Image: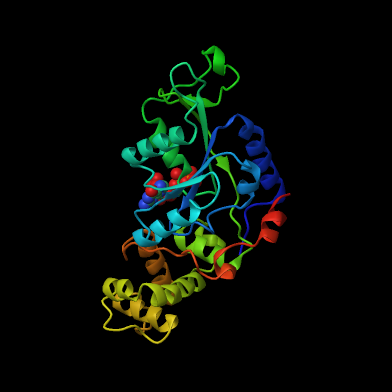
């Protein structure tokens, strides 16, 4: 597995967040709803301290709605945390998010009150930029001409008492956890040349055979589930014409096809993690979070 994040890069990203956080009233942590544990960097919990946080479960259109509901209930047990499933391009969802920000800090953003300042933070590919674009829409205005905010030149005035930091805080994915990294790869969060496509497809097929067998059967028109993930992948390849000369299945092409369809949501809403899964398969350990803090 290639890890793109070298220590200098991590240090800089962390310092940028630490520098901005003191002025921020609400942290918007963007997670992938399909894998909200592996798409998080636990360092953020430490950095934000007691600051209110909204965990955005983005890409909820691709996740299993029942599991997403479970995650919301699970996260909202945490102090100062609210959770909101959304689709980053959806303007109504963005409106709900801003409303929730106001609820969390009712003393900011109203008439005669100081602006409510929010910042979007998350690992690459979870949808931070998409969300910022939706939140700002066509109303983007650089702040700087108002006395109260002259020092905040990287803030965008959303014209509703809320200032949004124009660049998202970037955290790094926890790739040291092999199972989490595999789920990140399956979701499309890691570049395709950074992992072994066949292994990721097989691990994901194994999970889906256990948790979502009906979706697999339906998508690939299988009468029943083959005995192993390898056999399932071969069957998918056969049915989709991923063959080499001589009629043998091209496993790699089949793996690529399967992952492409999974990421596009063509199998249906699928969550790759759910609350209550064994911690070793669901969460990077605290020690690893510390390791990442360089
Ligand atoms: P980032 O800033 O956190 O790195 O993520 P970014 O917004 O660039 O989004 C990464 C990919 O995820 C983009 O797809 C984007 O369209 C997609 N995405 C973001 N939010 C959602 C969502 O709620 N649902 C779904 N289904 N997809 C979402 P891409 O293929 O990399 O780019 P593009 O071709 O869509 O522009």
Say which residue appears at 65% left-offset and 36% top-offset. Answer: 16
Task: Name the colouring of the figure.
Answer: rainbow
- On the image, the x and y values in percent for residue 72 come to 43, 53
Residue situated in front as seen by the camera: 82 or 286: 82
Q: Is residue 274 above or below residue 251?
A: above
Residue visible at 41% across and 65% down?
A: 259
Residue at 49% in and 68% down: 197
Task: Looking at the picture, tell me which residue is in the foreground, 28 or 90.
Answer: 28
- Image quadrant where residue 285 sits: bottom right
Res 249 seen here: no
Quadrant placement of the N terminus: bottom right
Residue 117 sits above or below residue 48 on the image? above
**Rendered location of residue 49, percent (x, y):** 63, 42
Q: Is residue 229 above or below residue 22?
A: below
Count of all numbered marks drawn on residues in the image:
0
Q: Quadrant of residue 230?
A: bottom left
Q: Residue furthest right?
A: 294
Q: Tell me if 183 is positioned left or right of 270 in this view.
A: right
Is residue 289 at least partly visible in the picture? yes
Judging depth in this view, the residue of 241 and 143 nearest the camera is: 143
246 w.r.t. 33: above or below: below
Residue 191 x %, y %: 52, 57
How far across and down, in percent of the image, does residue 237 sit?
Answer: 35, 76
């Amino acid at each position: 597995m290639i890890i793109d994040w070298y220590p200098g890069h991590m240090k800089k990203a962390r310092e940028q967040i630490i520098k901005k956080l003191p002025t921020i009233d609400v942290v918007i942590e963007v997670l992938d709803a399909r894998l909200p544990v592996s798409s998080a960097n636990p360092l953020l919990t430490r950095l934000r301290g007691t600051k209110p946080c909204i965990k955005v479960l983005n890409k909820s259109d691709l996740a299993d709605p029942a599991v997403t509901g479970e995650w919301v209930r699970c996260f909202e047990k945490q102090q100062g945390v609210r959770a909101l499933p959304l689709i980053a391009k959806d303007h109504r969802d963005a409106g709900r998010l801003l409303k929730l920000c106001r609820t969390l800090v009712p003393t900011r953003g109203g008439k005669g009150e100081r602006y409510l300042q929010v910042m979007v933070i998350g690992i690459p590919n979870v949808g931070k930029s998409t969300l910022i674009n939706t939140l700002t829409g066509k109303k983007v205005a650089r702040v700087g001409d108002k006395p109260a905010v002259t020092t905040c030149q990287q803030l965008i005035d959303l014209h509703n008492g809320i200032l949004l930091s124009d660049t998202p805080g970037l955290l790094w994915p926890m790739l040291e956890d092999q199972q989490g990294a595999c789920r990140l790869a399956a979701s499309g969060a890691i570049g395709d040349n950074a992992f072994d496509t066949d292994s990721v497809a097989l691990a994901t097929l194994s999970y889906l055979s256990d948790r979502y067998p009906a979706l697999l059967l339906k998508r690939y028109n299988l009468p029943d589930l083959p005995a192993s993930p390898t056999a399932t992948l071969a069957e998918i390849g056969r049915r989709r014409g991923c063959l080499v000369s001589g009629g043998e299945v091209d496993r790699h092409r089949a793996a690529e096809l399967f992952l492409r369809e999974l990421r596009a949501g063509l199998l249906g809403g699928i969550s790759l993690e759910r609350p209550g899964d064994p911690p070793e398969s669901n969460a990077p350990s605290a020690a690893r979070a510390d390791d990442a803090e360089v």
